[in-house]
Image (cartoon, rainbow, N blue to C red):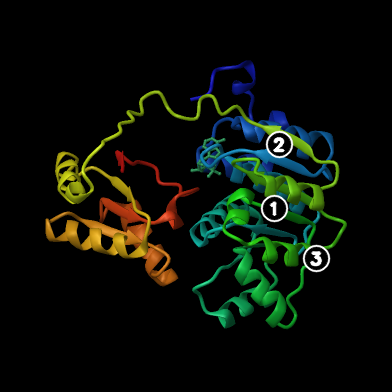
Amino acid sequence: MEENSPEDNKSFSDYGVCDTLCQAIDNLGWKHPSSIQRDVFKVALQEDQNKDIIAIAETGSGKTGAFAIPIIQRLIDNPQRMYALIVTPTRELAFQISEQFEALGSSVGLKTAVIVGGIDMVQQALALARKPHVVVGTPGRLVDHLENTKGFSLSSMKYLVLDEADRCLSMDFEEAIDKILSCFPKERVTYLFSATMTQKVVKLQRASLRDPVKIQVSSKYQTVSTLIQQYLFIPAKYKECYLAYIMNEFRGKSSILFVSTCSSSQLLTLFLRNLGFKAVCINGNLSQVKRLGALNKFKEGARNILIATDVASRGLDIPEVDLVV
Ligand code: AMP
């Protein structure tokens, strides 16, 4: 939780958000801007719309709204297709970001296209040909389309957002991001969002941002006070046995288990299912349809244990989780 400050009670319109968007925000049930949103709006909506921004903020801080709202507001003032490109490291995040754009822009008919791996290129090419307002994608597949899809270009784009930039770069998307940057118009507004300031992020910032405003929200309150953290030191060969015990203690509760490899996620899922648990796994070996299906089953509560590799380690917006192993 954040500490209370007088700014906490200010409304979205106090920071220059237009009425149309305030209505959409109200429909989402957001009462006040989060601190990253306040800081970004002060620059992007109040001081200088053309300013580049580098923001150090983690998932859960409301960062998607922080970049989506100024972009949509500007789009309302200057309606134009192929207006913004959002680059994000994982496919699930791309869908999540696109959903938030569409929810915020629903009353103005905002259209997005999600361009990620694991989904038919032709379908995506058709979606791009319909000229959405906002394209959200993962670096590799975006480059694939830039190289192979006739008519797809970034030349009319005004906004570039690099979301989870540190993760993008640590997953070796550097080359793909360079390619995207080289195809992007020089006259643009760039927002770079990152959870941490790694060397590669500093390099990217120097190369692709112009005199950016730096925004960093306090990370002091990021772990909620009600979270209980425990460390269990156990013999490796009895791991499954301990796990079964813990899962039994938390039977019926919603849990996420993180594992390091795709095969162990599959193995553990079978292990827990055999013990009568409602487990489902998500990993990079599954098709995108299956990945989204697993995530939806977990979000809806049809399965209450999600066994995940790091494809799900950041940014997923799941309202209630009782246990993370
Ligand atoms: P993000 O950090 O963008 O992944 O957002 C995390 C969650 O916070 C999402 O479920 C958003 O819908 C929600 N959210 C974003 N901004 C606000 C806000 N100002 N008030 C309440 N919830 C918000």
Numbered circle sitting on residue 161: 1
Residue 174: give x, y in percent of width and height. 67, 60
Residue 262: give x, y in percent of width and height. 36, 63
What residue do we see at 26% from left, 56% from top? 302
Q: Amino acid at mark 3?
A: Ser
Q: Amino acid at mark 1?
A: Val
What SS does tag 1 mark?
Answer: strand
Residue 21 appears left or right of 265? right
Mark whose residue sits in front, 3 or 1: 3
Residue 314 appears left or right of 201? left
Residue 85: give x, y in percent of width and height. 70, 60
Q: Nearer the viewer, residue 107 or 203?
A: 203
Q: Nearer the viewer, residue 239 or 93?
A: 239
Q: Nearer the viewer, residue 238 or 84?
A: 238
- Is any part of residue 73 visible from this angle? no
What SS does tag 2 mark?
Answer: helix
What residue do we see at 36% from left, 58% from top? 296
What residue do we see at 87% from left, 59% from top? 186
Find residue 12 and report its image quarter.
Answer: top right
Numbered circle sitting on residue 40: 2
Q: Earlier in the sequence, mark 1 or mark 2?
A: 2
Relative vertical location of residue 102 with respect to residue 131 in this rendering, above or below: above
Q: Amino acid at mark 2?
A: Val
Dot 2 beta carbon under 8 Å from ligand 1: no
Numbered circle sitting on residue 301: none
Q: Nearer the viewer, residue 111 or 225?
A: 225
Q: Earlier in the sequence, mark 2 or mark 3?
A: 2
For marks 2 and 3, give the CA distance.
26 Å
For marks 3 and 1, give the CA distance.
15 Å
